[in-house]
Amino acid sequence: MVGHEHPRESPAGSERIAVVYGTRPEAVKLRGVVALLGDRACPIHTGQHYDPEMAAAFESGIGFPPPEHRLAIGGGSRGRQIADATVGLESLFAAEPFAAVVVQGDTNTALSGALAANAGRLPLVHVEAGLRSYDREMPEEHNRTVVDHLADLCCAPTTTSEANLAHEGIVGAARVTVTGNTVVEAVLALRPDAAATNTILAGHGVEHDRYVLATFHRPENVDDPDVLSTILTELAALPIPVILPLHPRTAVRAAEAGLEPLLDKLLVTPPVGYREFLGLMGAAALLVSDSGGVQEESSVVKRPVIVVRRSTERPEVLGTFSRLVPSGPGVADAAREWLDDIAAVHERLANLPSPYGDGHASALTVAATDRLLASR
Ligand code: UD1
Ligand code: UDP
């Protein structure tokens, strides 16, 4: 099950840090940490995302190095993914004497990395710690909570997430540090310039500020055919074109539910590379999404986002960059409210700083990791 892909000349085994990832957002948000760790980083891909546009091709497009080890947990049930990844990682951690393990966020991959680190008695660093939606229907809420409690170092993006950790008894300068979110430096480093953005827009046949960019993949939105149908109908009712890069989960569910006629009314594309997505995001009139990362990125590219969810673990941007609209009817009305005065909305957001920091989160994370290792 374990593939050994790109063994590298590296520092002594005990200095190496296993960086465990497996999905698109983890690659985006660990990119800076891996770059700063250099040869000390041992990237390990669990294979949770496996289609080229979600994995290898996507990662090479953002400069993420090829993994040294690859598992193949993709496509399984939640329990199967967590079980296979935990066993696979545990055997990798037993074979090489890592100094620490880094995981990011709230995926099944992150939980598995944390469990395997715990089993191997390795120090665990959690990047993007302390987020809480308090929505117990979401697997991610359980994943991130368990990871935080297992972690030796929690890198909280904001003081809000730091307070969430404190509320659960996770405290102390040695265990919790506020870093900002590593997504900020990813956006700043990879966002295309004006000329490249124009080329991207031309490729999609849309004009600056005259389209909506939408993404959906959450079970609450795509697993129930009626809910998915309502969301697609709402998007099709908007007065300007809607670009919808289709997450594989959503593509599978839409096909199962026979919703192709609704998709035909939108500008549907396969998932696009990160630079292209950032270009589309920064020139959109507005965003409609259930993505975690898009909520944070909206505050960097200064575009408003309608969050189609019943809850969010990103309250820092609520009421400024984002607005919560639960799945179902109401998405089109909320979008029209913003679209009616979109130039003024953009002007207001242009002057608001991102609550997720100024692009130094990866450096602060690596510095805190080094302090953790020096203390042991
Ligand atoms: C996962 C994460 C979610 C994150 C999202 C980012 C968990 C519990 N969920 O959700 O937090 O926001 O990634 O995109 O870890 N599929 C493919 N090809 C792929 C990947 C997925 O076809 O490359 C399809 C398969 O049918 C698969 C389904 O999508 O069963 C769900 O994939 P999975 O990785 O389990 O969850 P995501 O919905 O992608
Ligand atoms: N993204 C992308 N191409 C797409 C859709 C999304 O590059 O077609 C980026 C998006 O900007 C974000 C990341 O992928 O940084 C993660 O998105 P996703 O919504 O899959 O995961 P989440 O953030 O909800 O966990």
Image (cartoon, rainbow, N blue to C red):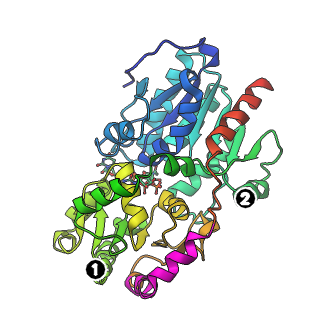
Asked if residue 232 is among those painted magenta in the image, a careful observer would answer no
Element marked by disc 1: helix
Q: Please state which of residues 251 and 114 is positioned toward the viewer in this rendering.
A: 251
CA gap between label 2 and label 1 equals 37 Å
Say which residue label 2 marks: 164
The type of residue carrying mark 2 is Asn
Looking at the rendered structure, the number of numbered marks drawn on it comes to 2
The type of residue carrying mark 1 is Thr
Residue 178 percent coordinates (x, y) = 73, 49
Mark carried by residue 233: 1
User: Which image quadrant: the N terminus?
Assistant: top left
Is residue 324 visible to the viewer in this orientation of the structure? no
**Where is residue 277, by image quadrant?**
bottom left
Residue 14 percent coordinates (x, y) = 64, 15
What segment is highlighted magenta in the picture? 332-352
Q: Please state which of residues 206 and 264 is positioned toward the viewer in this rendering.
A: 206
